[in-house]
Amino acid sequence: MTPTTIEIDARRMYTLLADGGLALARTNTGYGLVAMRSDAVRRIYALKGRSASKPCVTVGTMTILDDVAKAIDPDVRTWLARAVTQWPMAVIARTNRRSALLSSWEPFVASQCTKEETIATFFGVGELIARTASIAYESAQLIVGSSANLAGTGNNYTLDAVPDEIRRAVDLELDYGVAPYTTDRKLASTILDLTKGTFQREGCAFAEVQASWNDFLARAPRSQRPTLAPASAA
């Protein structure tokens, strides 16, 4: 897709999401359902058959993470800023109660996109969704979502693989071809829990992310290692 096409599609998607619509678009690890408002988030759960106890992810950039997350160690942030340019991944961090962006959420969205004072922020969403998130950020808004699959069935790497009942139910679908990262196991993104310094989920490019994280930890002075996972931060 050309930059012009991406910009047009991103602005079209943002307008739809801001009006309460639900979009279907490609991330780097498969097609996802993208929303901003409560009704659209409710539709995600209904379409997927997803348990309400499982939160949606927030589409992130490092700028967005700096606002919505609390007490990320500066060295961890430096490592993460490099890692997310190389591999698709999500991180779990402590929520920042003073976040201007989080205060823009409707109550139901907030309840479904945070869990026990943490927030999952998804990087590696591809140019289209990343640009849409940037447009939302300019209006002090966030976009959220989940993979476009039936619960427990794994990621769908092409639009044609998305179940018909999901495709028929969305307000906008955008075909950006095959996801850059695919696996035989239909894996999603790798998730690193920064509150514990451990991986919550092994996903695409897990071996590379894990090796980089372990190398980072090994290089850190031993006296500083307990602070690298901000779980103990006040």
Image: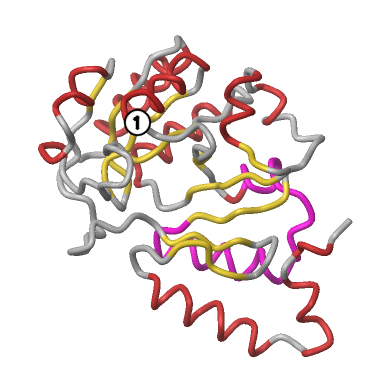
Principal secondary structure, stretch drawn in magenta: helix
Look at the image and name its color scheme: secondary structure
Q: Residue 190 location in percent, x, y?
A: 43, 62
Amino acid type at circle 1 is Gly
Which residue corresponds to the image point at 14% horizontal and 27% vertical from the top-left? Answer: 164
Please state if 208 lies on the left or on the right of 117 as rendered: left
In the image, residue 207 sits, relative to residue 23, either above or below, namely below
Q: Secondary structure at mark 1?
A: loop
Name the image quarter holding the N terminus.
top left
Q: Identify the residue at horizontal 34%, vertical 31% (top origin).
A: 49
Query: Would you name the residue on which mark 1 appears?
Result: 49
How many numbered dots are placed on residues in this image?
1
Q: Tell me where residue 176 sits by quadrant.
A: top left
Query: Does the segment drawn in magenta span residue 67?
Result: yes
Please provide percent x and percent y for residue 177: 15, 43
Q: Residues within 10 Å of mark 1 (few under 14, many from 20)?
A: few
Q: Percent position (x, y) of residue 142?
A: 56, 30
From the viewer's side, name the closer residue of 144 and 81.
144
Q: Residue 162, relative to residue 197: is it above or below?
A: above
Range covered by the magenta-colored residues: 63-89
Location of residue 130 by image quarter: top left
Is 26 situated left or right of 228 in this image?
left
Q: Residue at x 28, y 15 (%)?
A: 171
Q: Quadrant of the C terminus?
A: bottom right
Give the residue furthest to the left.
160
Most extreme residue toward the right is 234
Left or right? Give the position of 178 relative to 35: left
The magenta stretch spans residue 65: yes
Please state which of residues 10 and 125 is positioned toward the viewer in this rendering. 125
Residue 16, percent from left and from top: 38, 15
Residue at 53% x, 67% y: name it: 199
